[in-house]
Image (cartoon, grey):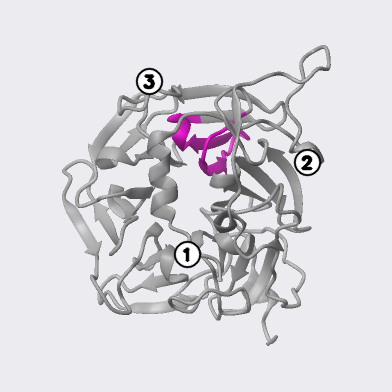
C-alpha cells in the first residue's frame, strides 16, 4: 500500500518555495514555449521529482456503465430541479489520488466519471469548477503544476496549460496552482500559491492578461503582494474573494483589485478556499486535524457558526472546502478521511456521506483523498434518471 498523502506537508512546502511551470495546449502539454524563431525558450524552470504519493492509485475507474449526460439547461442562479434535503443536486468530486473526477447523485449513483487519460499530463486533480454555462470543467493540479479544461458532454480533455512535473514563474509557468475558474467574461483565473500571485489568463491566446502579486514577494499587501493565496473566487457583481494561508487573511477585492475589505479569519489555523455564504457572511474550511468549518461576518469578525469535533466519527481531518447549501446545511470534503459530507446546520449531525470513512478505494462508494467538490446546478440528472435504477 502506498504511504498516506499528507496534504498539510505538501501545502506547507509551498511556504519555502518559489518558481515555475510552462504553457501548453492539448497533446503538446509537455513541450516548452517557442520563440519567434521556432527555438525553445530557456525559462527559469525546475523539473520536479515524481513520488509514489503523487502517482496515487494510477489510472483507475469505478467500472460503472455511465448513462448519457443530459444537456446543460441550468445555471448557478437558476439551477435545474432540486432533489431536496440532504443534498439538493449531484456533485462532482475531485478524487485526487485516484486521478479522476467523479459525479455522484444525491442517492449516491455514479453518473459521470473522468479517469486520467495519461498520468504524465493528468495526475492529482486538486479542484474542479464548472464554467458559468456548465459545459466546461476547469481542473487544477497542484503537484503536477498544470491546468486543464474538459468538455462535460464528451468527457474530453480540451485544453491544458503548463508543463507537467515542472515548476516555474515565467510566462506560462506555474508553481502549485490552486482553484482555477472560468469567469463569465471568458477569462481564466488561478491562485498560483508558491508564486504568491493571482493570474488572469486569456485561454484563446494562452497569455497572461493581469497579474496581482509578485513571485518571491510573499506578504499580505493586496493587490500588490499576497502571502501564498490558495483560492480566488468571484461574486456576481465582479468582485473577488481571496484566501491567503499565513495569518488566515481573507479579502474581498474589486474588479480592478482595490481592497473592499480584508480581515484575518477567526479561529482558523490553515484557511482553505473561502466562499461567500448567506447574508454577506464568509464560510471557510480549516485545513488541519482536527479540522473545522467557520462561518463569520467579515465586517465584524464575529463567528456566526462553527463546526469542530475533536475525535470520533464526526471529527474532520484536513477538510479543504466547505460550501453553504441553499438549505443552510454544509457540504464539505474531508480530505484525509476519504469522504464527502453534508452536515446539518442546526443539529451538527452528518446527514449525508459519500466515501467510506478512513478507507481508500476507487470502486463505487470509495474515494482516495477527495480534495474538492462542485455542485452540478446545470444538468437535470433527476429527470434523466427518473424511473431508472
Which circle, 3 or 1, is nearer the viewer? 1
Q: Residue 37 appears in which quarter of the rendering?
A: top right
Q: Which quarter of the figure is the N terminus placed in?
A: bottom right
Query: Disc 1 vs disc 2: Cβ atoms closer than 8 Å?
Result: no
Q: Alpha carbon of mark 1 to alpha carbon of mark 2: how far?
A: 31 Å
- For the residue pair 250 and 313, the one nearer the viewer reads as 313
The residue shown at (20%, 52%) is: 267
Question: Which label's residue is closer to the chain start, 3 or 1?
Answer: 1
Is residue 291 in sight in this rendering?
yes
Question: Which label's residue is closer to the chain start, 1 or 2?
Answer: 1
Residue under label 2: 26
Point out the stretch of residues depicted in magenta: 173-198
Query: Disc 2 vs disc 3: Cβ atoms closer than 8 Å?
Result: no
Query: Disc 3 vs disc 1: Cβ atoms closer than 8 Å?
Result: no
| Disc 3 secondary structure class | loop
Q: Which mark is residue 224?
A: 3
Residue under label 1: 4
| Disc 2 secondary structure class | helix
Q: Residue 104 appears in which quarter of the rendering?
A: bottom right
| Pointer 2 local density, CA inside 10 Å: few below 14, some 14–19, many at least 20 | some
The residue shown at (48%, 79%) is: 356
Tell whether position 197 is magenta. yes
Amino acid at each position: 500500500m502506498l504511504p498516506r498523502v499528507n496534504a498539510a506537508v505538501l501545502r506547507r512546502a509551498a511556504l519555502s518555495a518559489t518558481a515555475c511551470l510552462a504553457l501548453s495546449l492539448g497533446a503538446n502539454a509537455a513541450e516548452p514555449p517557442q520563440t519567434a524563431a521556432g527555438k525553445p525558450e530557456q525559462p527559469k524552470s525546475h523539473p520536479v521529482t515524481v513520488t509514489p504519493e503523487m502517482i496515487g492509485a494510477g489510472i483507475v475507474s469505478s467500472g460503472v456503465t455511465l448513462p448519457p449526460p443530459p444537456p446543460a439547461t441550468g445555471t448557478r442562479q437558476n439551477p435545474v430541479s432540486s432533489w431536496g434535503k440532504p443534498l439538493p443536486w449531484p456533485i462532482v468530486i475531485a478524487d485526487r489520488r485516484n486521478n479522476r473526477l467523479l459525479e455522484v447523485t444525491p442517492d449516491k449513483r455514479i453518473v459521470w466519471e473522468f479517469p486520467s487519460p495519461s498520468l504524465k499530463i493528468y495526475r492529482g486533480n486538486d479542484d474542479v469548477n464548472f464554467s458559468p454555462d456548465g459545459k466546461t470543467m476547469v481542473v487544477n493540479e497542484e503537484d503536477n503544476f498544470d491546468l486543464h479544461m474538459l468538455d462535460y458532454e464528451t468527457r474530453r480533455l480540451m485544453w491544458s496549460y503548463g508543463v507537467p512535473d515542472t515548476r516555474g514563474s515565467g510566462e506560462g509557468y506555474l508553481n502549485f496552482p490552486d482553484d482555477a475558474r472560468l469567469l463569465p467574461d471568458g477569462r481564466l483565473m488561478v491562485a498560483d500559491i508558491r508564486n504568491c500571485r493571482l493570474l488572469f489568463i486569456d485561454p484563446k491566446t494562452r497569455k497572461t492578461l493581469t497579474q496581482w502579486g509578485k513571485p518571491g514577494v510573499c506578504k499580505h499587501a493586496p493587490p500588490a503582494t499576497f502571502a501564498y493565496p490558495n483560492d480566488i473566487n468571484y461574486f456576481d457583481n465582479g468582485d473577488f474573494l481571496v484566501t491567503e494561508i499565513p495569518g488566515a487573511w481573507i479579502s474581498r477585492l474589486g474588479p480592478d483589485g482595490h481592497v473592499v475589505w480584508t480581515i484575518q479569519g477567526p479561529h482558523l489555523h490553515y484557511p482553505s478556499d473561502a466562499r461567500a455564504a448567506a447574508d454577506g457572511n464568509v464560510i471557510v474550511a480549516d485545513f488541519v486535524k482536527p479540522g473545522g468549518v467557520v462561518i463569520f461576518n467579515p465586517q465584524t469578525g464575529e463567528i456566526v457558526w462553527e463546526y469542530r469535533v475533536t475525535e470520533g466519527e464526526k471529527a474532520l481531518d484536513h477538510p479543504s472546502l466547505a460550501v453553504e447549501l441553499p438549505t443552510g446545511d454544509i457540504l464539505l470534503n474531508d480530505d484525509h478521511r476519504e469522504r464527502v459530507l453534508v452536515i446539518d446546520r442546526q443539529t451538527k449531525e452528518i446527514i449525508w456521506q459519500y466515501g467510506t470513512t478512513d478507507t481508500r478505494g476507487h470502486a463505487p462508494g470509495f474515494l482516495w483523498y477527495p480534495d474538492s467538490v462542485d455542485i452540478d446546478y446545470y444538468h437535470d440528472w433527476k429527470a434523466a434518471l427518473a424511473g431508472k435504477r
